[in-house]
């Protein structure tokens, strides 16, 4: 797969510009092999408070450490993106709902257990909320991202520091 200039300068993860390329690739694989792929959407809980209390340099340190945790939490065929601000998106290739939930929960727990160092010996406790959606075969992948976003919203409003699976939408048959 051709790498575009799709890297986030702060975290070195992929950025949104590379997402359509990856999703198109995963959609083709999903259709060809009749295997689903998933979207995990992460949002750092109370991130604005980090920036407001400790400054943007501290916020940047948190973002870099968070990105490193996510990058270590995925399989070799998955893609991690900085989706915007304190939101991160993971595309999980060839995954079923239960496995997607396990990957999300492992990453969430690793974040919650990690000491986030922001300089001068200061360590912050950071948590994240996660929305999970499995692609339903529809050609518009934005529907899957929207479902992951709705699940993320549920996680946030359900108390934060949790993973929520999007209800399944009407499945479209995967065919070549």
Image: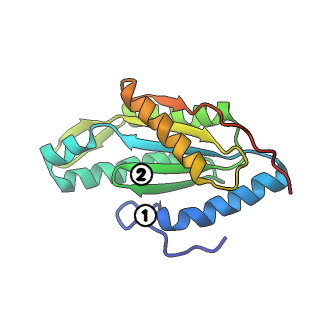
Q: Which residue is mark 1?
A: 12
**Residue located 44% across and 28% down the image:** 162
Residue projecting furthest to the right: 176
Name the mark on residue 160: none
Q: Position of residue 118 (x, y in %)?
A: 22, 47
Q: Position of residue 2 (x, y in %)?
A: 63, 74
Q: Which scheme is used to colour this image of the protein?
A: rainbow
**136 or 163: nearer the viewer:** 136
Q: CA distance from mark 2 to mark 1?
A: 8 Å
Q: Is residue 33 left or right of residue 156?
A: right
**Residue located 20% across and 41% down the image:** 49
Name the mark on residue 67: 2
Q: Are marks 2 and 1 in contact (CB under 8 Å)?
A: yes
**Residue located 40% across and 24% down the image:** 158
Q: In which quadrant of the rendered image does the C terminus lie?
A: bottom right
Residue projecting furthest to the top: 158
Instruction: Using the rendered view, name the quadrant where residue 44 is placed.
Output: top left
Q: Position of residue 67 (x, y in %)?
A: 42, 51
**Label 2 vs 1, first from the N-terminus:** 1
Instruction: Using the rendered view, name the quadrant where residue 171 is placed.
Output: top right
Q: Is residue 152 visible?
A: yes
Structural crowding at the residue carrying mark 2, measured as other residues with C-alpha within 10 Å and reported as few (<14), some (14–19) or many (≥20): many
Q: Is residue 126 left or right of residue 166?
A: left
Instruction: Name above or below for residue 149 compared with residue 22.
Output: above
Element on which disc 2 rests: helix
Q: Is residue 110 visible?
A: no
Q: Is residue 38 left or right of residue 69?
A: right
**138 or 119: nearer the viewer:** 138
Instruction: Name above or below for residue 19 compared with residue 103.
Output: below
Structural crowding at the residue carrying mark 1, measured as other residues with C-alpha within 10 Å and reported as few (<14), some (14–19) or many (≥20): some
Q: Position of residue 48 (x, y in %)?
A: 23, 44
């Amino acid at each position: 797969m051709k790498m575009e200039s799709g890297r986030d300068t702060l975290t070195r993860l992929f950025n949104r510009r590379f997402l359509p390329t990856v999703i198109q690739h995963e959609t083709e694989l999903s259709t060809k092999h009749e295997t689903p792929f998933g979207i995990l959407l992460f949002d750092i809980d109370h991130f604005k408070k980090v920036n407001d209390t400790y400054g943007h340099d501290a916020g940047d340190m948190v973002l870099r450490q968070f990105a490193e945790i996510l990058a270590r939490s995925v399989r070799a065929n998955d893609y991690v993106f900085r989706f915007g601000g304190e939101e991160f998106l993971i595309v999980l290739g060839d995954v079923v709902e239960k496995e997607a939930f396990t990957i999300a929960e492992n990453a969430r727990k690793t974040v919650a257990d990690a000491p986030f160092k922001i300089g001068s010996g200061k360590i912050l406790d950071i948590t994240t909320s996660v929305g999970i959606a499995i692609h339903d075969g529809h050609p518009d992948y934005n529907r899957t991202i929207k479902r992951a976003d709705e699940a993320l919203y549920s996680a946030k409003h359900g108390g934060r520091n949790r993973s929520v699976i999007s209800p399944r939408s009407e499945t479209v048959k995967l065919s070549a």
